[in-house]
Amino acid sequence: MKTKITPDMLPAFQGVIPPTLATSSADGMPNVTYISHVHYIDEEHLAISRQFFNKSWKNIIENPVFTVAVTCPESFCLWKINLKFVEERTDGQVFDEMDMVIQAIASMQGLEGIFKLQSAVICKVESIQTLVSNGKIV
Amino acid sequence: MERSFDHLVRELQEEKRKNALLQNVSSELNELTPLDIKLNNILELLDKSFNLKHSMLLIPVKDNTALRVIASRGFPDSGVGVEVPFNYGIVGVVAGKRKKLRVSRLSQYRRYAMALRNEKGNSSKPENLPGLTDAESQVALPLISNNELVAVLSCESEDIQFFHQSDEDFLMTLSQQIALSIQNSMIFERLEERVKSRTAELEKLNTTKDRLFSIIGHDLRSPVAALREVAELFQYYSNKGERNKLVEMGNKITHAAENVNHLLDNLLNWSLSQRNGIRCLPEKVNFQAIINEVYQVFKDSIDSKEIEFIQSVSPKASIYADYNMTFSILRNVLSNAVKFTERKGKIEVITIDDNDRLQIIVKDTGIGMDKAKIKTLFTLQEKKSTLGTERERGSGLGLVLVNEFIQINKGSITVDSSRDGTNIHLFLPKN
Amino acid sequence: MLLSDKIKKANASSDFVFWAANVGKNGICDLTRVSGFIIDDDNEHVTFFLPKKLFKLIEPNLSAGSNMSLLMASLKDFESYQVKGNYIGHKNCTEENVDYYRLKVLKIIDIINGMGLDGNNVFGFLLEQPSIAVTFRCNESYLQTPKPGTGTKLID
């Protein structure tokens, strides 16, 4: 179990393979969805893009610890990352960087207004567990 | 232990490779070449050194609101000249935010967009940038130098993960140098263009000067030659004691000398006005007085050609203009009238009140001019002087000067002419 | 709750991938890929399959509660559904089970290969043995396709 993101994990945050987000309500009901990508901030922080208001977000407010699963398209590792909600940002460097991708795609595909970054959800990395390494279950 | 040693060796090799690359790239970028060659060299360099096979460079245009493709490599359609607005697409957003951007799995977004569009019935914006139809990854970098967005570099690949973070970082460190290199080439081109246009200006001025000299040289010759002839005849008749002839010669000398004087005056005035050295000192000038003075200059020629000279001038008519320039204007106009009116013809000077201007018409019953000739009256051209009815010569400079002077005095001139004669209309301010 | 036709149809097609998640005592979620599921005759229960090693990730949480969620998403056009319900029980996979989900996983690997990624390395681990079949009772299902209005309950 590690507690920091290591350089070999970086390609997992390119959005090549969409990550999965699992949150839980206060009364222990899980909610699992796909998200477009997880944004790497530094070795202890990640950001999730919030595009549509939904159950996941509601859960995070009730219960700030949640889990994200990312796959590295180069080393074929699957990591389960436990995260804790830090803050929600609608401006600042992280928001800008995440917004750039969404703006670029939205404008190219004629999806302005539909595909729009509502906020950047900043989270702290609590622990990382490797589930699959080099294509084999650990 | 061995594994970490291997790892270190690999890292070191990688660093060496990068350094060699940096050196090569730097020396290439530092060369001062014309812009289009520079741009293609850069794209070729990126291809050979970084395996970036499909790339393009765009520059900000329209006051930093759009990007235009100025060079591309590896696309079926070069797309040079295509423009996209800032904040549109990957390159537009990079230009707008001045930050690099990498997007992977473009096909995923295309499919996502298609799925959404089918539901909503949206149509995507047409994208006419050159690009790979099946691009999977795209990275775009802002090239900034001296705090100015010089260009945007965009690279695409059909490979899902063709660009590593370390490659991206390396390219970013090069980006400033690339930006500076492009900026230098652009400045170089702009300077070259300015030199070209200045040279063209100078050449034009030179041609004008040459023309002037040629006209003057050409036109000075005949009155000077006439003077010489007359001087010789004067000597001849003097020796022979024929006094009548001497008086006749005397008149001819005066006439020829006046011509030279007139020409030299025009030349001096022209040269002064060209160098903006001539000063316009307007004052109230009584027209009748000045036209009388001008008439004195031509009295002998008018009499010798038996031309009828009529003044229909109101004694109160006055203008507000520079005296010497007005004199020059009237002298040149009258000189032409006399030159081109036949023996026993008529010249009339008329003044008409025209609100805040005085209209002066110099009418003659001379040979007139055709439309083509009227068109060229006020421009300086070679070989344009026309022989007078009694083969009098003059330069084409006269009316050119008249036009200049009358403009300086805030007036204007129009000409109409037929085979029955010419009318020159001069308009000068009254106050 | 009876499973909607939409989900039945989605499950019958071959371009869906699956995840399962549950919650531990400390409120932290665990999740894992699963190979797929079959719908029981009563249309209310499903059985999903996953390698034993991955089942061990979610098993410990069962002592905290039986709440579980299943996610299925299309690789082609992101059509997604989530089914919430309860863990009922589990046992080892039968050969029939393995044959069933192996076909599905191989098809997914093909699709991924076609996208330019190494499908076997991304999904191949789902075929590791031994494997477990988990029975799950469906309570609520939701449309999770990523677009405005995601998260609406499926009623039909």
Image (cartoon, coloured by chain):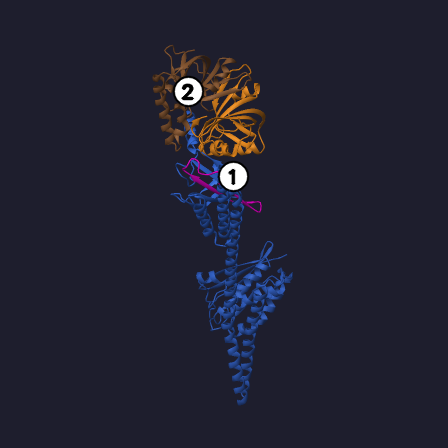
Chain colours: A orange, B blue, C brown
Q: Compared with residue B406, is residue C94 higher up or lower down, i.e. above or below?
A: above
Residue depicted at x 44% and y 61%:
B372
Give the residue type that dot 1 points to. Answer: Lys
x, y percentage for residue B245? Answer: 53, 84
Label 2 resides on the chain identified as C
Q: Report the front residue among A95 and B278.
A: A95
Amino acid type of disc 2? Answer: Leu
Element under disc 2: strand
B248 relative to C114 in the view: left or right: right
Task: Kindly give the residue lying farthest to the top in the view shown.
Answer: C42
Residue C126, how many percent across, how many down?
A: 40, 23
Q: Which residues are magenta?
A: B141-168
Spatial separation of the CA atoms under disc 1 and disc 2:
41 Å
Q: Residue at x 57, y 62 (%)?
A: B405
Camera-side mark, 1 or 2: 2
Residue A25: % across, % down: 54, 17
Foreground residue among B228 and A54: A54
Mark 2 residue crowding within 10 angstroms, few (<14) / some (14–19) / many (20+):
many
Q: Is residue B363 above or below residue B91?
A: below
Q: Which mark is residue A120?
A: none
Query: Is any atom of residue A9 visible in this view?
Result: yes
Residue B127, by quadrant, is: top left
- Quadrant containing the C terminus of chain B is bottom right
Which residue, given by chain and number where applicable, does mark 2 sit on? C50
Does the magenta-highlighted stretch encompass residue A73? no
Helix, strand or loop under label 1:
loop
Residue bearing the label numbered 1: B100
Q: What is the chain letter for disc 1? A: B
Q: Does B238 sit above or below residue B295?
A: below
Label 1: few (<14), some (14–19) or many (≥20) C-alpha neighbours in 10 Å: many
Q: Does the magenta-highlighted stretch encompass residue B163? A: yes
